[in-house]
């Protein structure tokens, strides 16, 4: 067997075993912890409604702050959430759910629109808030 045929066979076998291994790998028990505190870590931790409630809280808390103060506030909040125990995080999530469900439909729509505008500005490279 020539070297190129051998290399091709090894590459094909490697691809097959990688796909079989990936298919058999169970999902991580706690993916957000594995992601660290970087971008998207809390996306897997919270539902869309919970994230919107947190953003509504952030909009209220950071009103009148400079961009640097807002950035520091979000970093501190993220660090506190990532440091929570599973039980504390469950309580926090339950509180967010309860407060979201208690909002009237028009207020939910307003928060949703504000969050979508914030995210659109963020994706466009703007400051957002």
Image (spheres, rainbow, N blue to C red):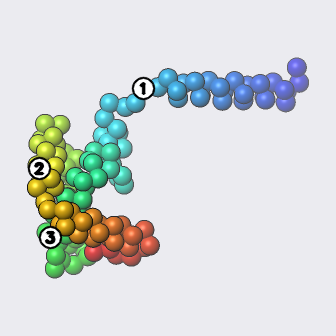
User: Would you name the residue on which mark 3 appears?
Assistant: 60
How much space separates mark 2 and mark 1, taking CA atoms?
Answer: 32 Å
> Mark 1 packing: few (<14 Cα in 10 Å), some, or many (20+)?
few
Closer to the camera: disc 2 or disc 3? 2
User: Which image quadrant is residue 1 in?
Assistant: top right
Tell me the element at label 2: helix
Q: Is residue 97 visible?
A: yes
Locate residue 46, reporting x and y percent. 26, 47
Tell me the element at label 1: loop
Give above or below for 54 relative to 1.
below
User: Would you name the residue on which mark 1 appears?
Assistant: 26
Locate residue 78, reporting x and y percent. 23, 55
Q: Residue furthest top?
A: 1
How much space separates mark 2 and mark 3, taking CA atoms?
Answer: 18 Å
Residue at figure coordinates x 72%, y 28% from the top left: 12
User: Which image quadrant is residue 113 in?
Assistant: bottom left
Rendered-image quadrant of the C terminus? bottom left
Residue at figure coordinates x 34%, y 38% from the top left: 31
How much space separates mark 3 and mark 1, taking CA atoms?
Answer: 40 Å
Residue at figure coordinates x 50%, y 23% from the top left: 24
Locate residue 68, reporting x and y percent. 25, 74
Q: Indicate left or right for 45 with 65 as reference.
A: right
Q: Which label's residue is closer to the chain start, 2 or 3?
A: 3
Residue at figure coordinates x 10%, y 55% from the top left: 102
Closer to the camera: disc 2 or disc 1? 2
Q: Is residue 111 visible?
A: no
* Residue 98 circle label: 2
Q: Which label's residue is closer to the chain start, 2 or 1?
A: 1
Locate residue 124, reporting x and y percent. 44, 73
């Amino acid at each position: 067997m020539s070297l190129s045929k051998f290399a091709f066979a090894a590459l094909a076998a490697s691809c097959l075993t990688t796909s079989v291994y990936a298919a058999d790998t169970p999902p991580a028990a706690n993916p957000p912890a594995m992601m660290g505190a970087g971008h998207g870590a809390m996306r897997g931790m919270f539902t869309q409604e919970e994230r919107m409630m947190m953003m509504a809280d952030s909009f209220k808390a950071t009103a009148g702050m400079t961009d640097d103060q807002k950035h520091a506030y979000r970093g501190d909040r993220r660090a506190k959430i990532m440091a929570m125990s599973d039980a504390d995080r469950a309580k926090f999530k339950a509180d967010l759910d309860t407060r979201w469900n208690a909002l009237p439909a028009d207020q939910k729509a307003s928060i949703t629109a504000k969050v979508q505008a914030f995210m659109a500005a963020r994706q466009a490279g703007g400051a957002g808030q």
